[in-house]
Image: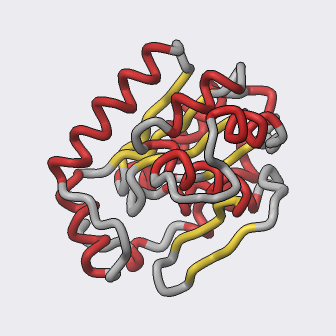
Amino acid sequence: MLLITGTGRSGTSFVAKWFYEMGKIDYDYIWLNEYSAGLEPSDVTRINGAIFIGNDKKYQTEKEIQDAIKKINYRVIKDPLFFYPNVLDYWAKTKKNISILICLRNFEDVYKSRKLKKMNNVHSPQNLTHYNKVFRHTLNKYEIKNQSILFPYFLDNYDEFFDKINLLDSTLNIDYKKGKEKFNLLVNKDLINFK
């Protein structure tokens, strides 16, 4: 299971869209044009929201959350909530053999982009720094295989992008040439706030 995550406003939706175009995302999702973002599966987002925010009547206990996670069997999942405290911890305790592609961006730019788009949950750069430390600790604690890409710079380097995905899960069998064509078609730097 390959998880795509990051702070949000860090290229996760671009990556998920590429995986979708490559036929590797097989769940229902929502795309929000006003944010140029989306592609999270609603069932995963609900579980992760219950873990991070904790206000979901369906998922009140650790067992209820873990039982819900056990039922998830997507090959590739995009959700920025994996980046936030406690979420990855639940998944790592419940699912074995997960790997993570982390989309990183300057935290100040993330903050400014979320404010510009008038998004909910605008976390300060200081909070994002703290969340990153907790996230990194969880990666190390469970020895989760991971690779990082830096937004927006990875948009200029398909080869590195492709190599990192193959390092995480070569069994996805992604065709290099087709992947590069889809990648180049999706890149639109006019959508980037605060380059």
Percent across and percent down for residue 79 are 57, 53
The quarter in which the C terminus is drawn is bottom left
Would residue 181 be visible to someone looking at this image? no
The quarter in which the N terminus is drawn is top right
Task: From this view, report whether residue 79 is shown above or below residue 97.
Answer: below
Percent across and percent down for residue 103 are 44, 46
Front position in the image: 86 or 30: 86
Front position in the image: 21 or 103: 103
Residue drawn at point x = 37 percent, y = 26 percent:
136
Q: Which colour scheme is used?
A: secondary structure
Task: From this view, report whether residue 6 is shown above or below residue 132.
Answer: below
Front position in the image: 108 or 70: 70
Residue drawn at point x = 57 percent, y = 45 percent:
4
Outermost residue, bottom direction?
34
Residue drawn at point x = 63 percent, y = 76 percent:
31
Residue drawn at point x = 37 percent, y = 73 percent:
120
Picture quadrant of residue 42: bottom right
Would residue 178 be visible to someone looking at this image? yes
Percent across and percent down for residue 114 are 31, 71
Task: From this view, report whether residue 166 is shown above or below residue 79.
Answer: above
Q: How many marks?
A: 0
Percent across and percent down for residue 180 are 65, 52
